[in-house]
Image (spheres, rainbow, N blue to C red):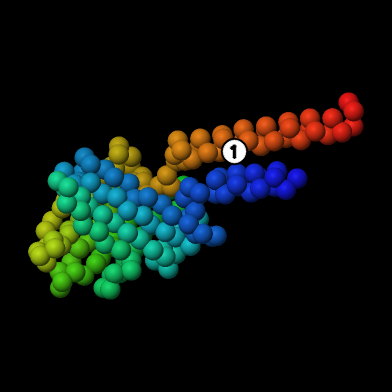
């Protein structure tokens, strides 16, 4: 029985790994859209307090974003000294995604991170309106020498071909993760069969 309980506990831990940083929180991976990023790649995470539905700034507890080009990467985090985030309009969280619809009025739904580095500004912005000419994605970074540079500033009303922008997603379980679960299920099955065999042997069946 003790062995069986250990196996069940292991399986539960394996199932809990993707997406959940701690009880009540959800960690999403920022999505990369190379077609609108001027040759740069984007990665990072956004962690919320677990709120489902429309998000407010207070619901976002941590973040990190990295832009990379030609092997050079620049990373900015919520734990840096001079940072802030801003959110205007609608940004919605489900258990698996953070999305931004087009704004319904003349304004924009706008969400961005700002990090002050050596007196300069690094920023990552999503601004979504009803029209392509007023919707854009934007990123500035600061080099190690303290030089501010523009990574991209692209007008688009679609990201990845979608009108409702998927800004970040909980990653799908990896092949290794699934293999671990399958292995654990196999061990549990074998253990159960062995236990039944021993019980039958003791009872003389």
- The extreme top residue here reads 205
Residue 127, given in percent of the width and then of the height, sits at 27, 55
Q: Quadrant of the N terminus?
A: top right
Left or right: residue 55 compared with residue 43? right
Q: Residue at x 55, y 60 (%)?
A: 23
Q: Quadrant of the C terminus?
A: top right
Q: How many marks?
A: 1
Task: Please indicate, yes or no, whether residue 5 appears anywhere in the rendered image.
Answer: yes
Above or below — where is 189 with respect to 171?
Answer: above
Q: Residue at x 29, y 45 (%)?
A: 32
Residue 80, given in percent of the width and then of the height, sits at 29, 69
Task: Please indicate, yes or no, whether residue 155 appears anywhere in the rendered image.
Answer: no
Above or below — where is 184 with respect to 2?
Answer: above
| Quarter of image, res 121 | bottom left
Left or right: residue 163 compared with residue 144? right
| Quarter of image, res 192 | top right
Pointer 1: what residue?
184
Between 81 and 8, the one lying in front of the other is 8
Q: Secondary structure at mark 1?
A: helix
Residue 16, given in percent of the width and then of the height, sits at 54, 49
Between 145 and 132, the one lying in front of the other is 145
Residue 159, given in percent of the width and then of the height, sits at 29, 43
Left or right: residue 5 compared with residue 107? right
């Amino acid at each position: 029985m003790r062995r069986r309980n250990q196996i069940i506990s292991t399986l539960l831990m394996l199932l809990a790994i993707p997406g959940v940083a701690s009880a009540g929180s959800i960690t999403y991976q920022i999505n990369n859209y190379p077609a609108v990023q001027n040759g740069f790649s984007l990665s990072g995470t956004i962690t919320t307090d677990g709120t489902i539905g429309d998000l407010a700034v207070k619901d976002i507890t941590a973040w990190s974003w990295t832009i990379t080009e030609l092997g050079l990467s620049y990373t900015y985090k919520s734990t840096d000294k001079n940072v802030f985030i801003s959110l205007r309009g609608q940004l919605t969280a489900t258990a698996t995604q953070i999305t931004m619809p087009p704004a319904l009025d003349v304004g924009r739904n706008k969400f961005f991170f700002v990090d002050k580095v050596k007196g300069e500004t690094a920023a990552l912005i999503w601004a979504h309106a009803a029209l392509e000419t007023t919707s854009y994605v934007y990123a500035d970074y600061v080099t190690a020498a303290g030089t501010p540079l523009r990574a991209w500033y692209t007008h688009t009303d679609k990201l990845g071909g979608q009108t409702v922008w998927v800004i970040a997603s909980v990653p799908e379980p990896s092949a290794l993760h699934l293999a671990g679960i399958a292995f654990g299920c196999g061990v549990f099955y074998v253990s159960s069969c062995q236990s039944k065999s021993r019980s039958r042997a003791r009872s003389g069946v």
